Amino acid sequence: MAISLAKGEKISLEKEAPGLKKIIVGLGWDTKKTDTGVDFDLDSSCFMLGENGKLLSDKSFIYYNNLKSPDMAVVHQGDNLTGAGDGDDEQIVIDLNNVSPDVKKIVFVVTIHDAENRKQNFGQVSNSFVRVVNADNNQEIVKYELGEDYSVETAMIMAELYRHNADWKVTAIGGGYQGGLAKILEQYQ
């Protein structure tokens, strides 16, 4: 049975799934009916950070226009333009054994495309979650559900995957930002 994390909680993947080699990070959401008159397009991305907390290179920012990391260990499965349906709306697959040793942390983000012009925010989004699944047996290891109302935020840092000695750990973040993806990019460049 998967562990449900609260904001700020962390777990060891090695402790929960010994010998874990490959994971799927699934991100999902539903949009509420609004009067903006424009469809929502949410996007997942991840930032591969070095010891200094910054992107190793521009190619270490994985999103719909750069689907694979330079070490080929992180692969975004593509952009879902509607978010329709149940389950994961977008997925990022990570081969933990092949992630470059220079990568100390991978940060998972969901943003609303063109949110300012469309007058959209995370207060209009519900059932947002991030989960980690063992890619070898499809078992969910951990899940974090965003439970707060974010009425002005247009970007969310959902979770972090980081190295601690020889172990990978996951922390539920749930940090909201105004200014969309550009604001988060500033933090990591």
Image (cartoon, rainbow, N blue to C red):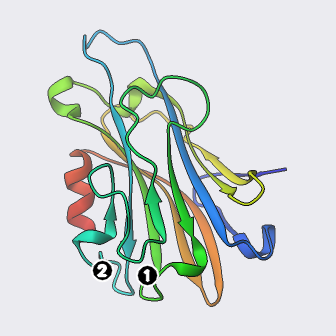
Residue that numbered label 2 is attached to: 56
Secondary element under disc 1, as helix, strand or loop, is: loop
Image x and y of residue 72, in percent: 43, 71
Q: Is residue 128 left or right of residue 182?
A: right
Residue 81 picture location, percent across and down: 35, 30
Residue at 68% over, 72% down: 21
What is the quadrant of the C terminus in the image?
bottom left
Residue 174 x %, y %:
49, 50
- Residue placed most toward the observer, 64 or 51: 64
Q: Is residue 173 above or below residue 122?
A: below
- Pointer 1 residue: 103
Q: Amino acid at mark 1?
A: Val
| CB under 8 Å between discs 1 and 2 | yes
Please, which residue is most extreme toward the left here? 117
In the picture as drawn, the residue positioned furthest to the right comes out as: 1
Is residue 124 depicted above or below 2 in this figure? Answer: above
What is the C-alpha distance between the residues marked 1 and 2?
8 Å
Q: Mark 2 is on which residue type?
A: Leu
Point out the tag, 1 or 2, that comes first from the N-terminus: 2
166 w.r.t. 140: above or below: below
Along the horizontal axis of the image, is 68 left or right of 185?
right
The residue drawn where x is 74% and y is 75% is: 14
Could you say which is closer to the camera, residue 135 or residue 2?
Answer: 135
Q: Position of residue 168 (x, y in %)?
A: 62, 76
Disc 2 crowd rating (10 Å Cα; few below 14, some 14-19, many 20+) is some
Viewer-side residue, 136 vs 186: 136
How many marks the image carries: the answer is 2
Residue drawn at 73 percent across, 71 percent down = 20
Q: The residue tagged with tag 2: helix, strand or loop? A: loop
Going by the image, does 161 lie left or right of 47? Answer: right
Judge the density around disc 1: few (<14), some (14-19), many (≥20) Cα neighbours within 10 Å: some
